[in-house]
Structures are given as C-alpha cells and as structure tokens.
Amino acid sequence: MSKGFRYGIEFRYPMAEVHATLTDPRYWKVRLGELYSSADIEVGDGSISVSVAEDLDSSALPGLVSKLAPDRLGVERADRWGPLSGGRADGSVTGTAHGLPIRIEASLELAESAQSHAVLNVVGSAEVKIPVLGGQIEKLVKKMVEDLLHRDRDAVEEFLADQRDFDDSEQVD
C-alpha cells in the first residue's frame, strides 16, 4: 500500500525565472556537484530531463531503513520539466532504490502564486514493499521527499540570487 502526499512549496521568484533555472543545465551542474559528470541530461525546447544514480552508505539513512538496507544502497532520481505553457509548467520526479523495494513518484506543477511568485504543487506517492515495516518506512520516505524538494527550492533560489549578483556586478564595470 503506498502513501500519498500533496503540498505546495513557495518560491520568492517569478515563475518564468524559476522555470528557466529548472531547465538550465548550468543549474543542474551546480545542484548535482560531483554527480553531474555521471548524470544523463537531455535538453529540449524549454524542457529538460535529468537522471542521476548514486550509491549511498546505509549508515547515512534513517535508523529503521539502515537496518534493512545493504551496506551500499543504489538510488536513482529522475527529474523532468516540460516547457511553460498556459501559465504553468508540468514536471515529475521519480526515485527508486536498488537493494530495497522503494519507489517514489510525484507529479509537479509550477504555477504562479497570488503574489506573482512561483509555487510548486506536488502530488505523489511513496511505496515500500516490505511486510510489517513498509508503512513506517513510507512515512519516512514521504518526509525525505518533502525535505529534498525544499532543498531543491533553496538551491534554485540561491542560483537565481547568484545570477542576479553576477548580472549586477557586470553592469557596474
């Protein structure tokens, strides 16, 4: 049985700027750091698909999960963003683990809030196929996904702030 989730994440920037960042390979290079060299990135007309895989040391996972995971847990994440259309952009994020039967799927909608800022509307599910403990782990996974998407928002906002600082410094010269 999967656990569903739904929430919104507010940005301090307009939707067009947030979307431009999310579909910019330079942002992903900064966001992924060392993993960028192994990421699969496909850029389209106003769209992007980013897939990355890494091995995590199970000791870095929450206690309940680390007890069930192998020493190294392979995880994959895929982000997809379509072009802006009709005042919004649709996207998705999926995640899987190799070594544990975990799957995360979320539909994303980037829209404009009443304050003319971007809002990310998230609707998804976390599924862990482990008898007895699956439901408890699903709750942890849901929280991890929300935390991850908030960190993504923070990374987008930091990238945009750095871009504005860079643009301002160029105008001074």
Image (cartoon, rainbow, N blue to C red):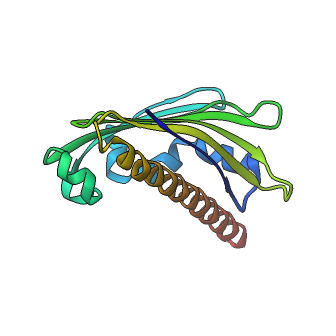
**Residue at horizontal 78 percent and vertical 56 percent from the top:** 117
Horizontal relation, residue 149 to residue 96: left or right: right
Report whether residue 39 is seen. no
**Residue at horizontal 76 percent and vertical 44 percent from the top:** 111
Horizontal relation, residue 117 to residue 144: left or right: right
The image position of residue 16, as x and y in percent, is 75, 46
**Residue at horizontal 73 percent and vertical 58 percent from the top:** 13
Of 133 and 82, nearer the camera is 133
Q: Residue at the far bottom: name it.
A: 172
The image position of residue 70, as x and y in percent, is 15, 44
Quarter in which the N terminus is drawn? top left
Q: Residue at the far left: name it.
A: 71
Residue 87 found in image quarter: top right
Report whether residue 126 is seen. yes
Residue 61 found in image quarter: bottom left
The image position of residue 77, as x and y in percent, is 40, 38
Q: Is residue 82 above or below residue 64?
A: above
Quarter in which the C terminus is drawn? bottom right
Horizontal relation, residue 18 to residue 27: left or right: right
The image position of residue 9, as x and y in percent, is 65, 55
Of 113 and 139, nearer the camera is 139
Horizontal relation, residue 119 to residue 146: left or right: right
